[in-house]
Image (cartoon, grey):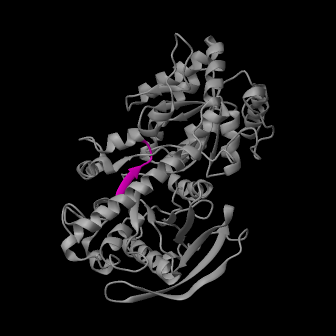
Amino acid sequence: MKKKLKILFIASEMAPFAKTGGLADVVGTLPKYLIKLGHEVRIIIPKYSGIDFREYTLEIAVEPMGVWMKYNEEWCSVFKTNITNNIPVYFIEHHGFFNREGIYHDHNMNDYLDNPQRFGFFSRAALQLAKDIQYTPDIVHVHDWQTALVPAYLKTWEFNDPYLGKSASLLTVHNAAYQGIYSANHYNYLGIDIKHFHSDAFESHRRMNLLKGGIYFSDLVNTVSQSYADEIRSPYGGFGLAPYFSNKGEHFYGILNGVDYEEWSPDQDKYLPTNYSIKTIKDKLKVKSELQKRFLLKEDVKIPVIGVIGRFVDQKGFHLLAQIIRRIVDQMIVQIVILGTGDNSLEGFFGYLPNEYPGRVGSYIGFSNELAHLIEGGADFFLMPSIYEPCGLNQLYSLRYGTLPIVRATGGLNDTVINYNENTGEGTGFKFWDISADALYYCVGWAISTYFDRKQHIEKMIKTAMSMDYSWEKSALEYEKAYLQAIENKKNYDLWYQ
């Protein structure tokens, strides 16, 4: 009989409570599918002041709770609510650390200088909570640099604890570019022995690298697609961490993120004016018409629409799009809708374009979940010109909605989009490889010419795309295997340590 695992998620984000990227989606969705596999899951995140709890009932779980750092005891409160499938979610409240306008930085995108202390405290508090509620997890699943200290605490502070001493750790790296590199002056507060401040663990050019230390201490490390795993352990990948990912050997690999088709599927999407499926694909045109209306585009369903959603940051490649978007609109029969926020100059640029190209370009600077669904459902193509992309979720949504992705072949985009074959009509999207505005321009042109000149191929690709299955059921099974391997690795470590 399969062992029922006790799984503790510790993360800095979780949808729908606090989100800046894909990490929150994973933490908010994967536990539901682990529950379906028969496991027990609990989740701990910080209680940020910006969380809207109006739809949830909060109760006090522990108050007050003392959290011992190296030289002092911090005090906090812990609240609890239950989400889908009765999964408990705990919120660590510390006004000094989490009562701020942003999660990691202020409105000017300046990192909070005490982030190491904020998330070092949170990591210690999460483990303290497990002890206070007498929870004995088989596996502690942590995410990115913000909770990468947890594996180190498990191997040092908690190695002989009756509740946590046998707990294994899995670290998921959602984006290796963000490593939690800060001044070594914070190290003392965290309470990790100075003997671990060396180049294989927390030390990095005399500074402190939290993700690097987490990789060193974790029983297993994974990232969110196999291509991205290969990229970040290659000589020129990994943002300086390639040797340390490689050092994990077979205990580092990719597990592709899944899609919650209960939310992202056109046949039941509550945000669409008309639902449709692979059998009623013509109804997608009604959604397209509404999309054109909402973004003040010329209402003509024969004109192809390219959708763009994302954060205006270097990683996402929107600076490439900015260089050639005028060429695209001037030289092609196409409409473009843009939804996003981030870099101020790009916000201004994309925000102004509808004035320059009325009826042909529409934009919304900010984020709207409703508009995101409408774009996925109504556009003909979805553009993701990412410089790198650990997994990506929008291309997976797009496939289910029959909105063919136009992507740079990197990371999860390369793993999940099948490049169009002009001879056979096979494929699910259009890829380019070079990091250049020209490469992006010609790939968009390829997609648009196919739309007009090989309509039967577009129809075939849409049916193939909508048939693809990237559900969390598959990924949850892969995580189950990873948990069991991490537990085995932990046992072997304990034997070696003794």
Q: Nearer the viewer, residue 83 or 169?
A: 169
Left/right of residue 271 with respect to residue 223 in the rendered view: right
Q: Residue at x 42, y 25 (%)?
A: 438
Residue 66 position within the rendered picture, expressed as x and y whole percent measured from the top left: 46, 88
Up/down of 143 relative to 303, above or below:
below
Does residue 321 sit above or below 370 in this rendering? above
Instruction: Pick the quarter of the image with the C terminus.
Output: bottom left
Q: Residue 125 magenta-drawn?
A: no
Q: Give the residue at x 46% y 39%.
A: 412
Figure check: 245 above or below 464: below
Q: Which residues are magenta?
A: 220-225
Q: Nearer the viewer, residue 80 or 72?
A: 80
Q: Is 163 in front, or is 274?
A: 163
Where residue 106 appears, as percent x and y from the top left, is 48, 67
Q: Main secondary structure of the magenta part?
A: strand
Residue 19: name its quadrant.
bottom right
Q: Quadrant of the N terminus?
A: bottom right
Image point 51% across, 25% down: which residue? Answer: 430
